[in-house]
Image (tube, grey):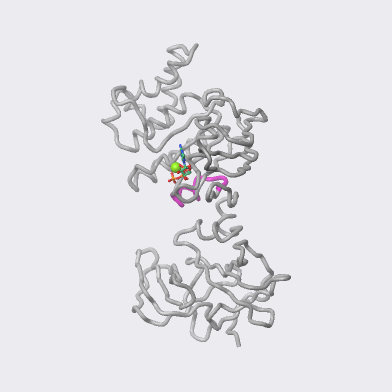
């Protein structure tokens, strides 16, 4: 059991502060995923939690005990890195037993029991006598995970453990990690990834980091359906949510800037200036004849992925084309006029400051402004 609590955590390297006022409360047994752009501080935060980096400010508590000064071992934390860092001259068995054998008071039979138990959990029992070089990347990463399991950590930290693996192995090992979490329900796990699918499928909650601060914490579906701000809206989901500028139409409604379509939201109290409309590619569909379109433009490019077709549409509102994800194979001529619609409950709105506004929708449809 390990309940983690970070309060006002800061990390500075010299004069440069790379983590600013991080506040997180992670209940025991939770699987938390950190995501964010490269350089935003994910690894630094993980290493801070591990005790590999000293905290420059704030407190970090495990089960109510401040552990700022404790070593990784005292914290009962184990970490798995992107590079497996196995000892090349040692067998799989010895790699897994090595850390334990350095600990005082561990009998040979106890070490053996723990190594075999971890190997069984990860299905690497038949490789115990092999050297790491005789294993595939996925098997090596499982050995690295196994080595961490044998230490029976309260907190398991993973820093992009699958990023060196090819696509098929990534999926297989991801499922392995999900199973591992089921088998170790009391072990708190924190997992850093760049992979949207890993984040969405593994996480109980996702922490979105940006430039050393937390943008939003929530379940995968909360972040996907109800992002707090434009950053999270653009970051979660692939391809990213389309963001279009909205302008007041002078009569309490909003129109797509430069466009002629009215969006059915009433002005939030005191709102002025600019707003943004967000709509996910998968929520756009072709508008039927006679049906009002939300977005109208010309096909710039299509990408047929078999299962879905991505259609890039020039709408003349932003530099970026609008992306629609349409089911199946869709054949469209480049330059053809395309009218797209979306269910009004799928539209998201953001203020000029980038924060989500959640106004009541005036109706369930939008109409041509007129
Ligand atoms: N030892 C260090 N000294 C100075 N600056 C550092 C040090 N380690 C990391 N940084 C800086 O801290 C910031 C956060 O780095 P970090 O490695 O945590 O990012 P990250 O989110 O893990 O990125 P990536 O996705 O590329 O792995 C970066 O700007 C990095 O240059
Ligand atoms: Mg990193």
For the C terminus, the image quarter is bottom right
For residue 281, side relative to residue 218 (left or right): left
Q: Report the number of numbered marks.
A: 0
Quadrant assignment for the N terminus: top right
The answer to whether 299 appears left or right of 185 in the picture is left
Q: Which residues are magenta?
A: 195-207
Q: Position of residue 118 (x, y in %)?
A: 44, 27
Q: Residue furthest bottom?
A: 370
Above-or-below relation of 302 to 10: below
Q: Does residue 347 lie above or below 130 as drawn?
A: below
191 magenta-colored: no
Q: Is residue 176 left or right of residue 345?
A: left
Name the residue rendered at 68%, 82% in the picture: 251
Q: Give the camera-side residue of 236 and 175.
A: 236
Which residue is outermost to the front?
A: 15
Q: What x and y, as percent, mark residue 126?
A: 32, 27
Residue sitting at x 52%, y 50%: 211
Nearest the camera: 107 or 301? 301
Residue 204 included in the magenta stretch of the image? yes
Q: Residue furthest left?
A: 134
Q: Position of residue 104 (x, y in %)?
A: 49, 12
| Percent of width and height locating residue 186 | 58, 32
Residue drawn at 50 percent across, 57 percent down: 235
In the depicted structure, whether residue 306 falls above or below residue 123: below
Q: Quadrant of residue 101?
A: top left
């Amino acid at each position: 059991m390990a309940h983690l609590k970070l309060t006002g955590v800061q990390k500075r390297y010299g004069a440069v502060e790379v983590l600013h006022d991080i506040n997180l409360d992670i209940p025991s047994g939770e699987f938390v995923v950190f995501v964010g752009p490269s350089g935003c501080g994910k690894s630094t935060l993980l290493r801070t939690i591990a005790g590999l980096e000293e905290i420059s400010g704030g407190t970090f508590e495990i089960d109510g005990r401040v552990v700022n000064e404790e070593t990784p071992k005292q914290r009962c934390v184990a970490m798995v890195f992107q590079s497996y860092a196995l000892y090349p001259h040692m067998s799989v068995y010895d790699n897994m037993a090595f850390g334990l054998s350095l600990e005082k008071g561990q009998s040979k039979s106890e070490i053996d029991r723990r190594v075999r138990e971890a190997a069984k959990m990860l299905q690497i029992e038949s490789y115990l006598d092999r050297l790491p070089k005789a294993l595939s990347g996925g098997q090596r990463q499982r050995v690295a995970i196994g080595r961490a399991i044998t230490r029976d950590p309260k907190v398991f930290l993973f820093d992009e453990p699958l990023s060196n693996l090819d696509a098929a192995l990534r999926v297989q090992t991801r499922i392995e990690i999900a199973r591992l979490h089921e088998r170790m329900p009391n072990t708190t796990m924190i997992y850093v990834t760049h992979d949207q699918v890993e984040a969405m499928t593994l996480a109980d909650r996702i922490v979105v980091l940006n430039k050393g601060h937390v943008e939003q914490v929530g379940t995968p579906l909360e972040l996907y359906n109800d992002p707090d701000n434009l950053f999270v809206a653009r970051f979660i989901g692939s391809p990213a949510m389309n963001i279009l500028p909205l302008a007041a139409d002078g009569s309490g409604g909003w129109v797509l800037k430069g466009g002629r379509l009215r969006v059915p939201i009433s002005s939030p109290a005191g709102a002025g200036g600019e707003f943004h409309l967000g709509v996910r590619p998968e929520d756009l569909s072709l508008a039927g004849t006679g049906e009002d379109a939300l977005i109208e433009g010309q096909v710039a490019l299509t990408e047929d992925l078999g299962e879905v077709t991505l259609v890039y549409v020039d709408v003349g509102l932003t530099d970026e084309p609008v992306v629609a994800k349409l089911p199946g194979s869709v054949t469209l001529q480049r330059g053809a006029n395309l009218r797209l619609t979306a269910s009004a409950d799928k539209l998201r709105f953001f203020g000029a400051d980038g924060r989500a506004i959640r106004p009541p929708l005036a109706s369930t449809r939008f109409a041509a402004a007129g």
